[in-house]
């Protein structure tokens, strides 16, 4: 089964992967490279949700600074 997730800017894939692992580490989610079927939907969702929350906060800060 192929993944529906894709990075819109292929050059950013490596950075997004690093970001995902950084967030998972902060949340205590034992994310590993490759298959993570041993994790619950809640664990995986918390990583994705926190990534979105951090990206929105960074963009809001950038916008507030007039960039």
Image: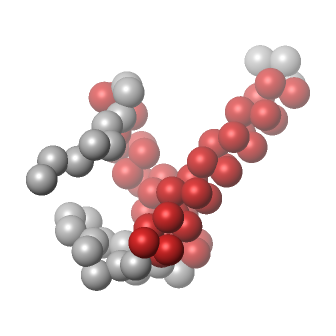
Q: How many marks?
A: 0
Residue 28 located left or right of residue 66: left
**Residue 40: percent from the left, percent from the top?**
40, 78
Residue 15 located left or right of residue 6: right
18 to 4, vertically: above or below = below
Q: Residue at x 87, y 27 (%)?
A: 64
Q: Residue at x 20, y 64 (%)?
A: 34
Q: Nearer the viewer, residue 37 or 59?
A: 37
Q: Nearer the viewer, residue 44 or 33?
A: 44
By what rule are the colours in the image chosen?
A: secondary structure
24 to 13, vertically: above or below = below
**Residue 27: percent from the left, percent from the top?**
58, 75
Let me know if residue 66 appears in the view: yes
Q: Residue at x 50, y 74 (%)?
A: 42
Residue lying furthest left in this view? 1
Residue 38 located left or right of residue 30: left
**Residue 67: percent from the left, percent from the top?**
77, 18
Residue lying furthest top in this view? 67
**Residue 29: percent from the left, percent from the top?**
47, 78
Q: Residue at x 37, y 25 (%)?
A: 9
Let me know if residue 22 appears in the view: no
Residue 56 located left or right of residue 11: right
């Amino acid at each position: 089964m192929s993944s529906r997730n894709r990075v819109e800017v292929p050059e950013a894939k490596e950075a997004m992967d690093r970001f995902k692992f950084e967030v998972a580490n902060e949340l205590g989610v034992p994310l590993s490279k490759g298959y993570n079927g041993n994790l619950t939907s809640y664990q995986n969702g918390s990583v994705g949700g926190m990534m979105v929350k951090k990206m929105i906060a960074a963009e809001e800060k950038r916008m507030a600074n007039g960039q």
